[in-house]
Image: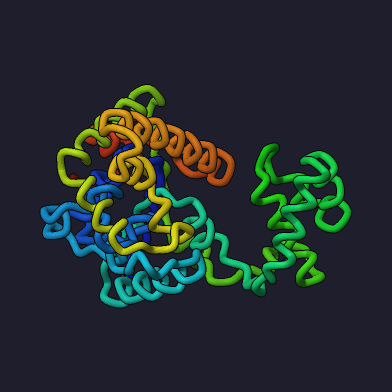
Amino acid sequence: MTGRIWLIAGPTASGKSALGQALARATGGEIVNADSMQLYAGLSVITAGPTADERAAAPHHLFGTVDPADGWSVGRWLRAASDVIGDIGARGRDAIVVGGTGLYFSALTKGLAEIPAVPAEVRDAAAAAFEAMGEDAFRSRLAAVDPAAATRIEVGDRQRLTRAWEVHAATGVSLSDHQAKASGALPAGSWSAVALEPPREALYARCDARLEAMIAAGAVDEVRALMARNLDPALPAMKAVGVRELAAYLRGETDLPTALAAAQQETRRYAKRQMTWMRGQTPDWPRLTASDARDQWRQFLALHPTLTG
C-alpha cells in the first residue's frame, strides 16, 4: 500500500503549519519540510519551525537537521525529500509536504535540471556585462541564445537573467534546453496540492505579530549563537529573514525596536515575493483564501470531501 502525497504551499505566516497539522490528524500522515530555512539546526524560532507539541503530534522530517555551516542546494533537498517521501509511502502513510520555498515545489512537481557548475570567471563576466549593458540590452543578447528564458524572466530579475546567460556561456546549451531535460519529479497524478493565499492585510498583520512573538521566544539568542560561529555570510542560513536585522542589533548598530521593525518589513516583502511566485508558477493549484485556520481547514475539506476532521 502506498500513501498519498499532499503539497501545501504558501507565504510565511499564512497558516501552512496549522493546515499540515490538521491534515496529519485526519490522515495519520507525516510532515515533510519544504522551507529552505527550516532545514537548519538552531534556528527553529527565527524560522518559525515546528514546536515541540507539533512534533509530538505527528512525525516531522527535514526540520532542523542540517548544520548552518552546510549550505544545501535545491537539488540536495530534492534528493533528501524524495527519499523521505518514498519511505513514508512504502509504509502506507500519507506524506504532507509543507513549506514556502517555491523552488522546492517546482523541483518536486517539474523535476530539476542537472546543470554543470558555472566557473566563477563566467559568473563574473555575466555580472559585468549586465552592469555595463543594462537590463534591456542584456535581455536582447540573451534572447539570441535562449529566447524562452528571455521571454519568461520577469522585468527586474537580474539574478535569473544573468544565470540564464551564464549557463549558456559555460555549457553551450541554453538554460531552457537544460530544464526541458529535468528529472526527479513526482509521478504525474501522484500528488494533490493547495496554495494558501489569505488577504494581504491580514497576512501582513500576522507577519508583524509573528516577529514580535519570535523576539519574546528567544530569536535574539538564536542569532547570537549563530553569529558566534563566524560563518560565511554567503551561507543560506545566514540569509534567513530576521537574522541580518537582529545581528545589526547585537553588533550595537541599532536598537531592538528598530531591528524588529526592519525584520517585520523584510518579512512582509518576503511574503509578497512568495505570493508573486505562487501566482506565476502554480496558477492551476486550488487556493485557500481564508485567514483563520479553521476556515482554511473547511475550505480544504470542501476540496477533499472524503476527508473528515
Q: Picture quarter containing residue 167?
A: bottom right
Residue 151 at least partly seen: yes
Residue situated in front as seen by the camera: 165 or 107:
165
Residue situated in front as seen by the camera: 307 or 273:
273
What residue is at 33 percent from the left and 34 percent from the top? Answer: 254
What residue is at 40 percent from the left and 73 percent from the top? Answer: 80
Q: Is residue 254 left or right of residue 106?
A: left
Where residue 251 appears, as percent x and y from the top left, is 32, 45
Q: Is residue 37 left or right of residue 153?
A: left
Q: Quadrant of the N terminus?
A: bottom left
Q: What is the total number of numbered labels drawn onto the structure image?
A: 0
- The answer to whether residue 200 is above or below residue 169 is above
- The answer to whether residue 248 is above or below residue 101 is above
Where residue 256 appears, as percent x and y from the top left, is 26, 33
What residue is at 23 percent from the left and 33 percent from the top? Answer: 212
Where residue 217 appears, as percent x and y from the top left, is 15, 43
Residue 302 at least partly seen: no
Q: Picture quarter containing residue 151?
A: top right
Q: Is residue 177 left or right of residue 243?
A: right
What residue is at 53 percent from the left and 71 percent from the top? Answer: 184
